[in-house]
Amino acid sequence: MANVCERFGERLREVREGAGISQERLAELAGLHRTYVSSVERGKRNISLENIERLAVALEVEMAALMPIRAPKNGV
């Protein structure tokens, strides 16, 4: 099972692609660097709540829409 950072990154990519926005454009809209967004999507960063909010605002979704499905109880 993927860790929470990887699952968050997968979910962010799903939402971003669903909105038809490139990583570069999302980074621009959120005031972040493209390589940062890329590393978040690859699960390489433990993203802060502030940056989750910035991405949600840029994607015009609620922060909760970016949250991955909860891991099974034995998969923490």
Image (cartoon, helix red, strand yellow):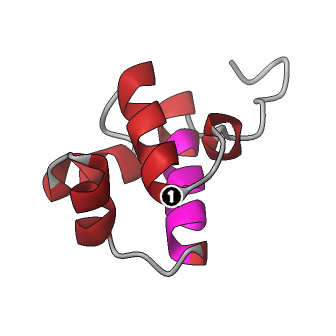
First to last magenta residue range: 8-17
* Depicted 16 relative to depicted 62: above or below: below
Residue displayed at 47% across by 33% down: 53
Q: Secondary structure at mark 1?
A: helix
Left or right, residue 44 beside residue 73: left
Q: Main secondary structure of the magenta part?
A: helix
For the point 52% across and 74% down, the residue is 17
Q: Look at 68% across and 18% down and name the residue there.
A: 76
Residue 71 image position (x, y, % from top left): 76, 30
Q: Nearer the viewer, residue 75 or 31?
A: 31
Residue 36, x across and y down, in percent: 20, 46
Magenta stretch: residue 76 in it? no
In front: 46, or 75?
Answer: 46
* Residue 48 shows in the view: no
Measured as percent of width and height from the top left, residue 33 is found at 14, 50
In-image side of 27 versus 65 (left or right): left
Query: Looking at the image, can residue 56 be seen?
Result: yes
Q: Nearer the viewer, residue 21 or 3?
A: 21
Figure quadrant of residue 52: top left
Instruction: Kindly indicate the quadrant of the structure image that contains residue 4.
Output: top right
Which percent across, then down, holds residue 14? Answer: 59, 65
Q: Quadrant of the N terminus?
A: top right
Dot 1 amino acid type: Leu
Residue beneath disc 1 = 59
Please say if 41 is above or below 14.
above
Residue 9 in the magenta stretch? The answer is yes
Numbered marks: total:
1
